[in-house]
Image (cartoon, rainbow, N blue to C red):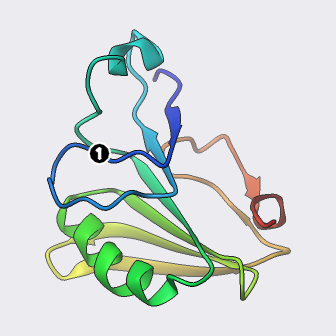
Amino acid sequence: MATPALKQRQSCSPPRHCALPSRRVSGGRPGGHRDYVNAHPTTAVLIVEVSDSSSFHDRERKRSLYARSGIPEYWILDVVASRLEVYRDPGEGGYQARLLLEADDSVVPLANSGAAIAVADLLP
């Protein structure tokens, strides 16, 4: 598998009403980031929202939107509560799995099972 590309504050193409995520990880492809010079990727393997004052919007509206769009993994980094919410297994009714991680926990993204990330390293 090619290395996923990390993009900051960029939208994904479908759906058109896709809000601007704080971070988006697109699946790696042979040309890497050069594949996206002329167009946005059509999907993402992970979207991360950094939430301070938008937590309700991130949890309710964006979460269901990303699940319906088939985004495999959605993280909300709640900087006020110093925790990470991880949503996985999207379906018509939303994400089927939810993990709530504290600053002393770590998370392994589905797209890269060899990369454990300390939640504390994500927090400001």
Identify whether 121 is placed above or below 86. above
Identify whether 8 is placed above or below 63. above
Q: Residue at x 34, y 15 (%)?
A: 35
Of the pair 24 and 39, the residue shown nearer to us: 39
Q: Which residue is mark 1?
A: 12
Identify whether 29 is placed above or below 5. above
Q: Residue at x 39, y 33 (%)?
A: 27
| Numbered disc 1: secondary structure | loop
Quadrant position of residue 100: bottom right
Identify whether 89 is placed above or below 1. below
Is 115 placed left or right of 16 in the picture? right
Give the mark count: 1
At which x and y percent is residue 55? 51, 85
Is 115 placed left or right of 57 in the picture? right
At which x and y percent is residue 1? 46, 23
> Which amino acid type is shown beneath numbered disc 1?
Cys
Is 117 placed left or right of 74 in the picture? right
Q: Where is the C terminus found, in terms of image quarters?
A: bottom right
At which x and y percent is residue 105? 78, 72
At which x and y percent is residue 74? 44, 64
Q: Residue at x 38, y 19 (%)?
A: 29
Q: How dense is the environment of label 1, judged by Cα within 10 Å: few (below 14), some, or many (20 and up)? A: many
Q: Residue at x 38, y 57 (%)?
A: 20
